Amino acid sequence: MKFLFKKQFWLHVAGLACVALGFIGMALPVMPTTVFFILALICFTRSSPEFANWLLNHPKFGPSLQLWQNHQVIPIRGKCLAGTGMFIGFIILCLTTAPMWVIALVGVIELGVLYYICTRPSKAPAHCPFK
């Protein structure tokens, strides 16, 4: 039972959950994928080097995760897809019976996330092999 109280165990569980959500996001158009893989990489870097290496060497996600880990780069395509997904999700939220405070809170959070995404570099430095 001691393992339940270890930080590494919970980081590993969170990493696995993020990977699962990332794969679900590949099928659902308004759910992000890359964000969950970035969070999984952060968790696995601290809990399971084997899983972190698996993510970094994954044929589909590895190059973008390496760009993020090494240079905090978000490609323009990723920025556009993230913004579009957030916009579609916000429009759908506005069409529901959600309280106005929920709509406003989600809008403010999405604007903050969009600002963060847009202020990250879009290209790796010239010397980077993962362009």
Image (cartoon, rainbow, N blue to C red):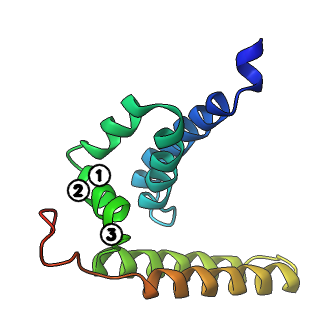
As displayed, is residue 28 above or below residue 99?
A: above
Residue on which the image places disc 1: 61
N-term mark: 3 or 1: 1
Return the x and y of residue 122 as percentages of the image width and height: 29, 81
Q: Nearer the viewer, residue 69 or 16?
A: 69
Task: For the N terminus, give its image quadrant.
Answer: top right
Q: What element carries label 3?
A: helix
Q: Residues within 10 Å of mark 3 (few under 14, many from 20)?
A: some
Q: Which amino acid does label 2 sit on?
A: Pro
Q: Nearer the viewer, residue 18 or 8?
A: 8
Task: Give percent across and percent down for residue 61.
Answer: 29, 52
Q: For this view, does 68 lie left or right of residue 116?
A: left
Residue ID for mark 2: 63
Q: Position of residue 10 (x, y in %)?
A: 67, 33
**Relative vertical location of residue 35 with respect to residue 104 in this rendering, above or below:** above
What is the three-letter code of the residue carrying label 3? His
Whether label 2 touches label 1, CB < 8 Å: yes
Q: Based on the displayed image, in which of its 4 quarters is residue 67 positioned?
A: bottom left
Q: Which type of secondary structure does the marked residue at label 2 adopt?
A: helix
Crowd band around label 2 with a 10 angstrom C-alpha radius: few (<14), some (14–19), many (20+): some
